[in-house]
Amino acid sequence: MNNSISYQRCFCKSKELIKTFEEINQICNKVDDLSHHFFIDEDYHDFSSTPCAYIALYKETVVGFLCPYVIDSYNMEFCLLVLPEYRRNHLGSQLFFHMVQDFPEHTYTISLIPENKGGKSFLERIGFSYGCRECSMALLRNSFHPISSKMELDVSKEDDCIHVIGILSDIEIGELSFSISNTTVCIHDVEVYEKFRRQGYGTQFLSAVLSDIFEKYETVILHVTKENLPAYQLYNKLNFQVLEELDYYEL
């Protein structure tokens, strides 16, 4: 079969191409009984000099694809899917090496759900190593139990992002930012300053922020690496629940 497989770079993000990728993703999800992650760069423009995708074709039919997402001059993420009946024919590795030819200086990152053992084995075979496990977590208003504290909040807004500094007895103890989409708030860039860590200040700070947020909004979401144990334990203490876990591999 290998002699019948050809590889192409795609420079046009057409509706037909995206539909083909979506169909392959659906087939892989059904056969593998897994939730594969598929994306194509939303900011890509058809006049770009770099490919929006790499495809493997068998008799002019797309049987596998790789979509890159360039983060910056040194880092990129990608997704990769091959139809089950065409696996074990090195299609995945060939798609990856075609991308590497175009981006030889980058660090490459890909995410898998922890249950995807086949994907893990493939990545290890081509040299990837485990980086971290990222958790998406959510907290609903009716599951939140505020903690009493004297924490004050200094709130400022820049564009679509709201920045909050936690202040206790006129001393800044930490900061975070959040953005709002409809009835959902996404918290990010949470930091408790080093000398205030492991003393309960982070719990007081985040609880004060959540109390304000839940006066108007229904749901708060955030992301944390499971290896960041203090942060992960803090969110658990405040009753955040894990929605999804992804393992990140790097090369």
Image: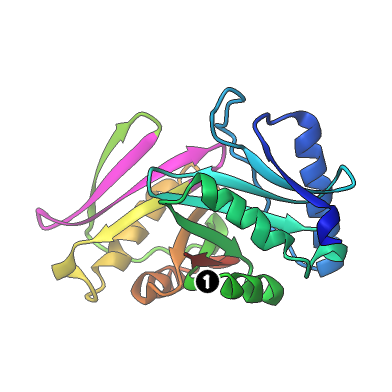
Q: In the visual, does 38 lie left or right of 86? A: left
Q: Is residue 39 above or below residue 236?
A: above
Tell me the residue at 65%/62% (across/down): 93
Q: Residue furthest top?
A: 47
Q: In the visual, does 157 lie left or right of 26? A: left
Magenta span has 206? no
Residue placed most toward the observer, 39 or 168: 39
Magenta span has 175? yes
Residue range corresponding to the magenta coloring: 161-185
Q: Position of residue 220 (x, y in %)?
A: 50, 52
The residue that disc 1 covers is: 127
Would residue 214 be seen by someone viewing this image from the given angle? no
Q: Residue furthest left?
A: 170
Q: Position of residue 196 (x, y in %)?
A: 17, 68
Q: Is residue 145 above or below residue 215?
A: below
Q: Position of residue 39 (x, y in %)?
A: 65, 46
Figure quadrant of the N terminus: bottom right
Q: Quadrant of residue 125?
A: bottom right
| Label 1 CA crowd tier, 10 Å (few <14, some 14–19, many 20+) | few
